[in-house]
């Protein structure tokens, strides 16, 4: 059973169980109102068990107060509501500017940009997290996530980072967990990760590297796509897109149902996602759908499909830059450019071949435009327009 927050709560786990029991009966499930009623009944039957305080060494800080990564209340006037940028032109390009060979990094998969511009790269099979300095090309070892099990093609998948913490999605034993580790770069190389502090644990473990993306959303919440396969269909959270507080608990509002970490019901298992400038979540799933979910508010969001790729395409990682989505395709050696005009597409996605890439899997915004990683052992800075 999945657990949420530093130690998890039984009420949150029951909430997701109730919500996804409806989802398991069909990809579209029932209306959010029906699920909310089931969740309420589950909450009445079970009271939450207290969660232990976070481990200070893991970057959790003392219990109480602000959650890690959550901005405090702004002083003075509220921040202005973000607006859409001008529409992207229908035509565009992506050019490999610099390429780095990831010698000594076994099975690279996870990729994140640190606040100082350096890259974190995770080794899927060893659980080791590496730091690449783009200015020098030097790669050093940050630390190793304990307990990573890569049997069946999983292991250490998604990485995310903020000022002081590293977040990781990885398989351990029979399940998957999402943990937070303090990042302490002043320590000795290889010893720069603090102790594990659980955000979400007990997630279903699917074979392969589907799902496994994580990120810190512009709304101050944490997002994760959970893998799914034939053996996990119908299990709690399998194939879903989760949205929690930075402490790992279901948010008070904005998700598919009250008290549930399930962000929104989508047709397939979410493979990758990113946010545009007004906070919409764009995602691709294993059915080949490109969809968009409105920015969270006090109501349940309804995803809308904008495009479906034909069989043979394999869209996976998603990034947003320059009023366009950039989506890696593991089957083609290229990246899809999707020009946007607010919540609509200007034109159909167009595939751009990337020199030196055989199966690009992960993309993040940063540097001159994008950073793209190929599990064969290459990461490149890609300029876009």
Image (cartoon, grey):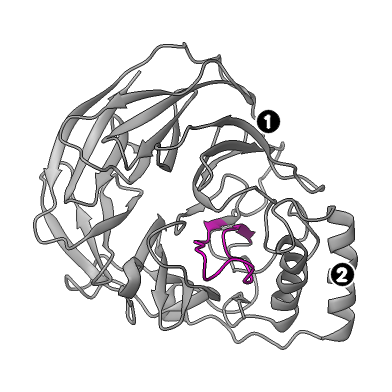
Q: Is residue 43 or residue 227 the one in the foreground?
A: 227
Whole-percent x and y of residue 151? 31, 75
- Left or right: residue 203 versus residue 384 is right
The residue at which mark 1 appears reads as 80
Q: Are marks 1 and 2 in contact (CB under 8 Å)?
A: no
Label 2 environment density (alpha carbons within 10 Å; few <14, some 14–19, many ≥20): some
Specify few, some or many for label 1: CA neighbours under 10 Å numbering under 14, 14-19, or 20 or more: few
Give whichever of discs 1 and 2 has the lower sequence position: 2
Is residue 158 at all visible to an observer of this figure? yes
Which residue corresponds to the image point at 17% horizontal and 30% vertical from the top-left?
Answer: 355
Q: Position of residue 381 (x, y in %)?
A: 23, 35
Residue 104 position within the rendered picture, expressed as x and y whole percent measured from the top left:
10, 61
Quarter of the image for residue 152 reads bottom left
- Above or below, comparing residue 374 to residue 18 in the picture: above
Report the span colored magenta: 223-244
| Residue at 35% in and 42% down | 363
Q: Nearer the viewer, residue 307 or 135?
A: 307
Q: Which residue is mark 2?
A: 38
Residue nearest the observer in this picture, 265 or 320? 265
Identify the main secondary structure in magenta: loop
Q: Is residue 327 above or below residue 141?
A: above
Quadrant of image for the C terminus: top left
The N terminus: image quadrant: bottom right
Q: Residue at x 71, y 70 (%)?
A: 16
The one of 349 and 14 positioned closer to us in this rendering: 349
Horizontal side, residue 129 vs residue 54: left or right:
left
Q: Secondary structure at mark 2?
A: helix
Q: Position of residue 22 (x, y in %)?
A: 78, 64
Q: Quadrant of residue 95?
A: top left
Asked if one can make out residue 280 in the rendered structure from this viewpoint, the answer is no
């Amino acid at each position: 059973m999945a657990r949420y927050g530093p130690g998890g709560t039984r009420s949150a786990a029951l909430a997701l169980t109730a919500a996804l029991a409806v989802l398991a009966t069909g990809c579209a499930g029932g209306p959010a109102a029906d699920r909310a009623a089931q969740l309420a009944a589950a909450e009445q039957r079970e009271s939450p068990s207290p969660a232990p305080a976070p481990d200070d060494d893991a970057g959790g800080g003392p219990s109480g107060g602000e959650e890690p990564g959550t901005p405090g209340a702004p002083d003075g006037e509220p921040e202005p509501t973000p607006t859409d940028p001008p529409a992207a032109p229908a035509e565009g390009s992506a050019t490999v500017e610099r390429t780095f060979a990831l010698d000594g990094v076994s099975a690279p998969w996870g990729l994140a940009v640190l606040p100082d511009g350096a890259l974190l790269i995770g080794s899927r099979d060893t659980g080791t997290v590496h730091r690449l300095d783009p200015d020098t090309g030097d790669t050093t070892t940050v630390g190793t996530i304990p307990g990573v099990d890569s049997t069946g093609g999983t292991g250490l998948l998604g990485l995310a980072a903020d000022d002081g913490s590293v977040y990781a999605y990885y398989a351990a034993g029979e399940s998957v967990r999402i943990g937070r580790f303090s990042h302490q770069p002043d320590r000795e190389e290889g010893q720069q990760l603090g102790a594990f502090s659980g955000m979400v644990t007990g997630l279903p473990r699917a074979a392969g590297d589907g799902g496994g993306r994580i990120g810190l959303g512009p709304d101050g919440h944490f997002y994760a796509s959970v893998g799914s396969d034939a053996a996990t269909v119908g299990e709690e959270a399998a194939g879903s897109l989760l949205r929690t507080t930075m402490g790992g608990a279901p948010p008070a509002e904005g998700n598919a149902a009250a008290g549930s970490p399930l962000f929104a019901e989508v047709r397939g298992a979410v493979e990758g996602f990113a946010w545009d400038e007004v906070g919409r979540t764009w995602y691709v799933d294993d059915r080949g759908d490109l969809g968009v979910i409105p920015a969270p508010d006090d109501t349940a969001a309804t995803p809308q499909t904008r495009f479906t790729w034909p069989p043979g395409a394999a869209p996976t990682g998603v990034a947003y830059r320059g009023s366009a989505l950039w989506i890696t395709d593991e089957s083609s050696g290229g990246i899809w450019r999707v020009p946007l005009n607010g919540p609509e597409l200007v034109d159909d996605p167009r595939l751009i071949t990337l020199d030196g890439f055989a199966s690009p899997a992960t993309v993040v915004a940063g540097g001159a435009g994008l950073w793209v990683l190929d599990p064969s052992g290459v990461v490149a800075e890609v300029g876009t327009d």
